[in-house]
Image (spheres, rainbow, N blue to C red):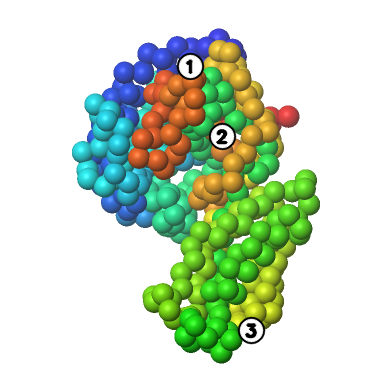
Amino acid sequence: MERRSLSEIWEEAQNLFPFSQSIRRDLHRHPELGYQEKRTAGIIAGELKQLGYEVRTGIAETGVAALIEGNLPGRVVMARVDLDALPIQEETGAEYASQVPGVMHACGHDGHVAVGLTVARMLASRREELHGTVKLVFQPAEEGLGGAERMIAEGVLDDPVPEAALALHLWNQLPMGKAVIRPGPLMAAADMFTIRIQGHGGHGAMPEKTADPVLAGAQVVTALQSVVSRSISPLESAVVSVTQFSAGDAFNVIPDAALLRGTIRTYEPDVRERVLERVRSVAEHVAAGMGCSAEVLIQPVTPAVINDPQVAKVTAAAAAAAVPDLRIDETYRVAISEDMAYMLEQVPGCYFMVGAAPSAEGTPYGHHHPKFEIDERSITVAAAILTAAILDLAKSSDHS
């Protein structure tokens, strides 16, 4: 793709900012939780139909998929956008704050939809010069509710099958003008663990007659902190966090059992296997050493988000050419998880992050916080990057 056409993308994305902002603010006022995004899906479908896209609705209840065929031969490229809000009471005080009690777009998905619809307009205006086919996928229920898996099960990756996939996150922990586009792991795999420690309760004044699961649980919590520091190389990354500890209901009674819950985050499959084995082993052996037993249940949540090196390379080049003075970081990664990982297991792709910090001064309120906010100009940056990358990826299968 020539630089001239890419510079035109940046100019058009800027010109579309009033539209992008209006979409984002409207959705921010009317947030919807996972699988309840009916109003959001209706706005998306209506806009796409008006632009001439072939639109399919009702995928995984509220998901939308749209196709646009270019006039030139090329590849099938997919871009995925997430829709859902969070069960959080907004505290921003913004003029466009949520009008739904207890529900808020506290992760930026309203901005993502604005990006997706802005890109849809930009692609529609370029249909004559567009190569291949573009599939825009608007996914419900990303926030831990399995939306990606359901959409895959209901055929969103079929007819036509994407040859490359893209997704993005507006990230308010990074400054405006910066983007993370990197090969390999970007976001961690997530597993949830539950450890039930069974002991033998009794009177709090006679602990010698008990097998205390509270004491055993406390020792397990401490011992689990050694899993990463003593079982994983300093050159590798993992997180083991105990986030819940419950036991007993009386001040003078040692209970029979204690319950621990937490999360495990890893990037590499072999590291994940080692961490899961060590969590299980440590819990069982430490509990046994305290005269109790431990039952460990580990539930997978999502795999790691792993970018295809070649798709990431093309995306970074297109981004650098399309957005003036864009700073691209190829090293940043985070331990949060994202269910786009399931799609990237089947389609080579690139998930990238666009800086959206609302202020250059101080640390903004992060994602999932009641005072979460973004700099809305990041929508323009993201739309330009995504459009440029789609156009470049669709042109040819040869990006060497």
Q: Earlier in the sequence, mark 3 or mark 1?
A: 1
Q: Which mark is in front, 3 or 1? A: 3
- Mark 3–mark 2 distance (CA, rounded to whole Å): 49 Å
Q: In the picture shown, does residue 77 fall above or below 122?
A: below
Element at badge 2?
Answer: strand
Query: Where does the image place residue 53, in percent across and percent down from the top left?
Result: 35, 34
**Foreground residue among 122 and 288:** 288
The residue where tag 2 is placed is 352
- Mark 2–mark 1 distance (CA, rounded to whole Å): 18 Å
Quarter-of-image position of residue 359: top left
Query: Where does the image place residue 93, in percent across and percent down from the top left?
Result: 27, 30
Q: Which mark is in front, 2 or 1? A: 2
Please report the residue visible at 52 percent of the width from the left and 86 percent of the height from the top.
Answer: 206
Residue type, label 2: Phe
Residue 176 as seen in the image, left or right of residue 140: right
**Foreground residue among 101 and 342:** 101
Q: Earlier in the sequence, mark 3 or mark 2?
A: 3
Residue type, label 1: Ile
The residue where tag 1 is placed is 9
Q: Which mark is in front, 3 or 2? A: 3
